[in-house]
Image (spheres, rainbow, N blue to C red):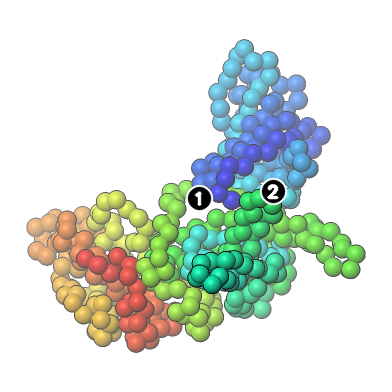
Amino acid sequence: MNDKVEYKGYWWIPNNPDRAIAGVITYLPQESITLELIGSFEEDESPMSAFLRKKHENTIFGITSDSKKVTLLNCSAYGSLNLSCPFPIIKYTCQYLLIGDHIETLEQERYFKAYVKFPLLSLWCPPRALTTSVTFCEAQKIEAINISFNTNRDTLCGVFINENTQLNLESGIDYDGEYYSPKIEQYTYLDIKKGSNKSISSFLKEVFIYEQFLSFATLQEIRCSNIKLFCNNECQDLKNGEKSFSPIQLMYIQSDYISPIKKQREAFLFNYESIKSKYPNIIKKWFVEKNDIAPIRQHLIDSVKYKRVFSSVDFIIVVQALEGFCSRFRKESNLTDMINLLIAEFSDIDKLQGDTINIKEVVDSRHYYSHFMDRKKKKNILDGYELYKLTVKLKKLLVCCLLNFVGFDNNEINMILKNSNNRLFEI
């Protein structure tokens, strides 16, 4: 959801459902989830007492003016006091907003499926859900444009991560049927299916891992933009014996996040079409071995985030990721040996051919910026633009390491880097 959401309704805490207070919930994407109550959850409380008593609430339930169930989680009270007002105005800032269900915690197991949208996923893996044909008249002018689509969701690729989890890339269509100005949007989304009921927390963990995969594939930080959950308690029985499940919207605040820039597919590290045959094995390895690769993967994502200014921290992040990769998967413990090993391993990668990496500069700069030792003790410390150039070279080496980890050989890595026009590979 990219637009502001606002609901009026009644609100209460789970252990006191008889004390419902009128109020408004407002969601501003990537900014805030705010609940404003006209009154307090305690009976016969003065405005002063309510203001002084305001506290954290783990869970707040609500029912909106259009009869939607709402859950707010991790709610902290804030605000100011107006002594001239005969009733208290209590405000809460909340971490999670769930529209369509009441749950006490994120750990409550009741959801069996999630639809997840990500920025750029449709560009990374085109949905191809629309069919367009053009008819020309004799004068070679366009006579008609016909657009058709199937409202059924098509599975582009399905992968079983384990016996309880399946990840599908599916195409979808949003159609606004207004007669004079119809709007059609096609998109690709991630469908997470479970063999048994699971918690929101477990779904969020898998969303996070897929966010990191897309961030790696597109070479920019990706966060999900929309999550719809489905549970057996929120459904209707149809006449044919089937069930219609009502989607439950989950929204939460993702701090320190900059929306990705829409780039051409050529600027990605790779796209779905270029790795289609290997995608099932790649995504399974990414999920199954998530713990071994987690810190290295996160450091790479941190290194490709948009930053206006380069600093020594950016250098340290990349070096630590290379150290982590070698210590876990190459069993080297000395930084000099690590860098030498990786340079030799990827010596046939064209994008690395012109990179001369001075190992002493890597080691001395790493020790200096990590431990703040006396600069006089290290002769090969870089800073400024020279440190930036070294970081770019090491970052390319790190990308090769991650590509190797997910299953690409050097010939495939060479082709991936050749076909990518991302500025990451430029100095």
- Above or below for 182 versus 4: below
Label number found at residue 254: 1
Tag 2: residue type? Ile
Q: Residue furthest right?
A: 239
Could you tell whether 37 is left or right of 298 in the image?
right
Element marked by disc 1:
loop
Nearest the viewer among 343 and 145 is 145
Please tell me which residue is depicted at 42% across the width and 69% down the height of the picture. 265
Query: Would you call the spot at circle 1 few (<14 residues within 10 Å), some (14-19), or many (20 or more)?
Result: some
**Whole-percent x, y for residue 294 in the image:** 45, 68
Tag 1: residue type? Gln
Label number found at residue 303: none
Q: Which residue is mark 2?
A: 99
Cα distance between the residues tagged 1 and 2:
18 Å
Please tell me which residue is depicted at 65% across the width and 73% down the height of the picture. 154
Please tell me which residue is depicted at 85% across the width and 68% down the height of the picture. 242
**Whole-percent x, y for residue 79 in the image:** 56, 27
- Above or below for 232 versus 133: above
**Whole-percent x, y for residue 287 in the image:** 53, 73
Whichever of labels 1 and 2 marks the residue nearer the N terminus, that label is 2
- Above or below for 6 versus 79: below
Element marked by disc 2:
strand
**Whole-percent x, y for residue 162 in the image:** 62, 78
Nearest the viewer among 354 and 138 is 138
